[in-house]
Image (tube, coloured by chain):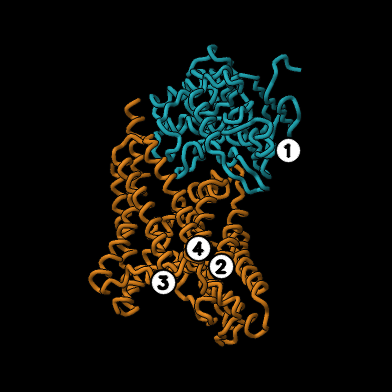
Amino acid sequence: MSVRENVVEAKNLGKSYGAVTALDDISFEIGRGEIVGFAGDNGAGKSTLMKMVAGDVTPTAGELLVNNKTENNLTTKHAQELGISMVYQDLALCDNLEIVENIFLGRELTRFELGKFKVIDKDRMLARSQELLDILDLELPSLEEPVTALSGGQRQLVAIARAIAFSPKLVIMDEPTAALSVKAGQPLLEQIRRLPETGCSVMFVSHRLSDLLDTCDRIYVLRRGNVTHEFTAGNVSEAELLHAIAGVSEGNQ
Amino acid sequence: MANARARDVKNSTLAADTRKIRLLLLAFATILLWLAFDLIFTDGFVLTPRNLTTLSVQMTVTCILAIGMTWLLIAREIDLSAGAVMALVIVVIYQLQVVHDVGTLITLIVALAVGVLLGLINGSIRVVLMVPSFVVTLAGFSWIRGTAFIVSEGQTHAGAKDSFYLISNSYLPPAFSIALIVLIGGYFSWKALRNTLAGQRKLPISRVLDWLQLLVVVGVTIGAAVVFYVYRGLPFPVLILLVVILATNWVSTSTTFGRHIYALGGNPLAARRVGISISLMTIGLFALMGAFTALAGVIQASLLDAGPPGIGQLLALNAISAAIIGGTSLFGGYGSIWGTVVGSLMMASIANCLSLAGVDTFFQMVATGLILIITIAVDSLVMNRGKGA
């Protein structure tokens, strides 16, 4: 019914583990090319929600729509096929593998396949990685160096390069700046702001309110498994956002 | 920011170079060992084509096992039961050949099946019960060895069929040997030369290392060509080993299976998240280890022309030592087939040189232990310095 073309839409989503309710009643939508932030205190349900969209957790109530189709039984693999990719907070990089290998880990470009036996096409992987890192404005002399030598910000960008390698529709970012200094986080946020240029939307989860305010088009506030507020960026101050997260009444609109 | 980038990459280049330096040092140390024993203790016997041919045969069994072990170690697994598996394979071979008069081809198929089956059992217990492989294969070390004694009734059979005996006791004719070696050595020399001339790496030290690597590859090729041409040709076990080395090295570097072994050791959680099946990979690696062990068993059985159930008590540990001396990490993620080959060669050389010099076997064990301590001491010094920098 919505006017906007939504990549992901949630209608009254809920998730209970026995008697414990992680998500109570969550509704939101993420439009094409939109950067949508999710804020909330620890235990508000942010990470359960992310995992649900990524197909790691299935809802026990409500409806999850991806590309306007109900996908309540999403698996991680299926989510990937639908164009949803996730950048984990710990980045999930293999330190011992080369940059190019990390970007394509599990989805290597091949030049020969016999069932599960696949011969890697390194040249194509290198060329494609270079394109991706150009998009992200990350200059590295060699893509064949192990990831272990990169700085925190560079590692983040490599993880993002992996997330956007197969032209996803939605990238889920779990606390991308948490491990970085505010200064080191700035270029990263700049790159996240530019992701919609590649045609994808961003689900941005963060504790750093200034990052959310700087980067997102809209921000949902989660509290105790419910969406309590929805803000449009520019219409909200950091103090108001903080009050909403903490559940202090004067923050309500 | 730009400076920080440059410095980061410099560090990582040094890390890659450190591994190359390590391998080159090991190779040079081995050559030095040969020279020392050749000149000082054995009146020039060590470096004769005849002894070097013997040495190449002596390293095959341990090296094939060490290659399988390298993959397991990279994936954070281990196999302590390899020696027992080999004993059971050898016992089965002699039961078939001597007691039941079974032909060689069937014997080989059964031997391979026994090895793979035992690997599958080890791997499945590991994965299904989620028991560390150290414990699973420690159990195997005992029950598989016991089974070998039960199957053989404690007897050592000898005298396999001629066709089986010939497996480890024949040679590729010298002309073919030299052609094969020049072909393979030429390919790797060409690759090393291209790498050296490409000069994408800017650090002078990297360039020096590239040249040294080229020198070693060309030197080994020429040396091997001469040795195997002058004596009797390439021994069959060494030919088998060569095939195993080339195949496993290629799988390690150029296939998804090979790279996923490293991913498993580097960050299992990340590997799982991108959809790599850790269980299947682990079971597959143990099955492959079983296959390598069976192959080593066939070579050993044919060399020995007898099947004692007590054979190979220390084999698994020797294979682990060879892999570690060759630079494989016990904590997973790092290691290479060529490193393990040089590690195995180093260990075989110690045994060979010391026994030629008339030194007792017990001292060989002491020497191997010392080499292990020296290599890991150097490794940990280098690593800690790297962390401090």
| Disc 4, SS | helix
Picture disc at residue B241: 4
Tag 1: residue type? Answer: Asn
Q: Residue A182: image x %, image y %?
A: 40, 25
What's the residue at 52%, 72% (across, down)? B170
Disc 4 packing (10 Å; few <14; some 14–19; many ≥20): many
- Mark sitting earlier along the chain (3/4): 3
Give left or right: position of B252 versus B225: right
Residue at the far front in the pictured view = B175
Q: CA distance from mark 2 to mark 3?
A: 19 Å
Give left or right: position of A242 versus B161: left
Chain assigned orange: B
Tag 4: residue type? Answer: Leu
Disc 3 packing (10 Å; few <14; some 14–19; many ≥20): few
Quadrant showing the N terminus of chain B? top left
Marks 3,1: beta carbons within 8 A: no
Tag 3: residue type? Answer: Thr
Q: CA distance from mark 3 to mark 1?
A: 63 Å
Q: CA distance from mark 2 to mark 4?
A: 10 Å
Q: Which residue in the structure is indicated by mark 2?
A: B295
Q: How many dots with numbers?
A: 4
Q: Which residue in the structure is indicated by mark 3?
A: B54
Q: Which residue in the structure is indicated by mark 1?
A: A73
